Amino acid sequence: MTLLPSNKALVPFVSVDHMMQLINHTGLTQMMIGLCEYIENDFKRWELFDKTPRVASHSAEGVIELMPTSDGEVYGFKYVNGHPKNTKDGLQTVTAFGLLADVTTGYPVLLSEMTLLTALRTAATSAMAAKFLAPKGATTMAMIGNGAQSEFQSLAMQAICGITHVRLYDIDPLATEKAAAHLAAAGLEITTCKTAQDAIEGAEIITTCTADKQNATILTDNMVGSGVHINAIGGDCPGKTELHRDILLRSDIFVEFPPQTRIEGEIQQLTDDHPVQELWNVISGQTLGRRSDSQITLFDSVGFAIEDFSALRYIRDLIDGTAFFTPLDMLADPDDPRDLYGMLQRAK
């Protein structure tokens, strides 16, 4: 991609409004497919990237995190929060923005909202993992937790994995009603369920996405039969889990970056030497994902900076030649780069 904008002092900014216009212009299905391709390509070159667990600032109300990475040519980071209590005040649980910069100059080349984009990239990553780990020909997914992520998760599975039927459950019936209306309009067969147990009946893929930051047991061991793929995306910080530990002991576990997942994911319940597999090895063809019909596969997803890097890279390429961004005057550009003070004085 072209790194520097035509005017090096202006940085493209994709606002929430522009992101919505871009998604609607491109089509949500095509966006999911495009994001999945970019993420998959970056997973195939995983070893090139700087990798570090996200930097987190925890409070009683939630968490604020920075997620940085670089492939040696481009640097990217995301700022993101997680505050489950926000919904009571009519606020989003998660908000985010991200930036790309040219490693050669250090100049930023893209600033973007990432509240919507994170929902899309999380869903695209889930579907990418399911493409390699779920039973072949899977048509039914249980979606446990019907909040802001649920529609994106379901639509990504439809677009990338061919899911036709979604079984919905949430402790809040209004959340399930909301998700059911949206997903039925997208052409999916929808079943609303009264319990998590009901939701997983006949499902080949089980996605858990709940918001409360606690060690919860959304799925118990007796609920999970052989041959399913579990997409556990709700765990994202220390002390927050969704699955009973015994499920983990029966599963082949795939993760993004073990040092981060052992702190934040379902596997924080296990010993540090419990074997897990890195998803990039499966994506790159170095190891097999699903090996048998009876195998339980578990994608213990907490979100990783490379996925955000891929999403920002995709948006950077997608907005080229469009009007779906605003050029921001973010960078000082004096005639003489050594005379920043003179530029200030001349501005009088």
Image: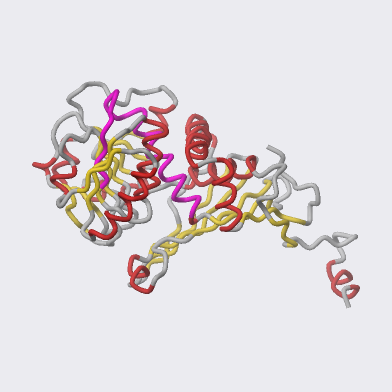
Q: Is residue 35 left or right of residue 215?
A: right
Q: Residue at x 80, y 47 (%)?
A: 6
- x and y percent of residue 123 in the render? 41, 43
Write down the region rendered in magenta. 116-143
Where the N terminus falls, by quadrant?
top right
Q: Nearer the viewer, residue 347 or 194?
A: 194
Going by the image, does 214 lie left or right of 98? left
Viewed as shown, does residue 207 lie left or right of 50? left
Above or below, 225 against 136 in this view is below
When the figure is inspected, residue 59 is found, relative to residue 211, above or below; the finding is below
Residue depicted at 52% across the width and 51% down the height? 68
| Residue 137 included in the magenta stretch of the image | yes
Q: Quadrant of the C terminus?
A: bottom right
Residue occupying the point 70% across, 51% down: 106
Where 222 falls versus 336 (above or below)?
A: above
Question: What residue lies at 40% left-to-right and 22% top-to-bottom?
Answer: 286
Nearer to me, 132 or 281: 132
Give coordinates of residue 118: x percent, y percent.
47, 51
Classify 252 as above or below 270. Answer: above
Kindly tell me whether residue 252 is visible in this rendering: no
